[in-house]
Amino acid sequence: TVKRAAKSPGVQASPEELLAWTPGDFAARFTVTDEHGRAIALEDYPGYRLFHGLEPAPLLVRSVEHATGRILWSQVSATAVRDDDGEVVMTVTVSDDVTAVKDAEAAQRFLASASKLLGSSLDVETTLGRAAATAGMCRFRSKLRRAAASAGALRSTLNTSRAPPRAA
């Protein structure tokens, strides 16, 4: 509904204000692309496709809110309203918020990548460095380096504190 859309993230307007928004108002608040970061042409929107006799494939839309940098995802689909002759007279467009689903998918990909990295090397310093790079945790690199150095010192201590091998 318009009331719900007016209170959605990045909008925060009255229903009347939202109905008065122009495409330029949306462009001033959001950068809108497809899931690959490419600009979306008008011809790709399901409602436009219906009006031009084309099959309306659902469209996954990635919106970045300018004010906060927050990424919002929506699945846009449309249905035609036809007159008695079967001509499209209007379309009903539905935009489903799928942000939580996309965030969960990204978290799963990160965990899978981190698990693969952590299991790929027994060298603690190398593995922690790779994990830091994967997570984009630049500010934590010094802490991870200290942890790796501590792990290396511990490994060195363990290696030197072992009993000497028995003579055969």
Image (cartoon, rainbow, N blue to C red):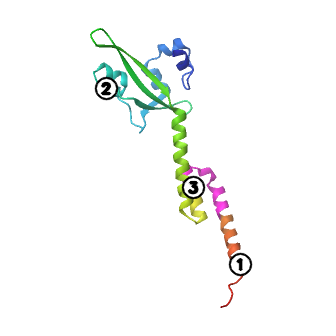
Q: Which residue is mark 1?
A: 162
Residue drawn at 54 percent across, 45 percent down: 108
Q: Position of residue 64 (x, y in %)?
A: 50, 32
Q: Which portion, as a residue range, is magenta?
A: 133-148
Kindly indicate the quadrant of the structure image that contains residue 166: bottom right
Distance between the alpha carbons at the discs numbered 2 and 3:
44 Å
* Disc 3 packing (10 Å; few <14; some 14–19; many ≥20): many
Q: Which residue is mark 3?
A: 131
Residue located at (57% from left, 20% from top): 7
Main structural element of the magenta stretch: helix, strand or loop?
A: helix
Report the side of 11 relative to 156 (left or right): left
Q: Which residue is mark 2?
A: 55
* Amino acid under disc 1: Arg
Q: Earlier in the sequence, mark 1 or mark 2?
A: 2
Amino acid at the residue labelled 3: Ala
Where residue 139 appears, as percent x and y from the top left, is 62, 50
Q: Residue at x 36, y 21 (%)?
A: 47
- The reply to whether the magenta stretch includes residue 34 is no
Q: Nearer the viewer, mark 2 or mark 3?
A: 2
The correct choice, above or below, for 75 with respect to 164 in the image is above
Disc 2 residue crowd, few under 14, some 14–19, many 20+, Cα 10 Å = few
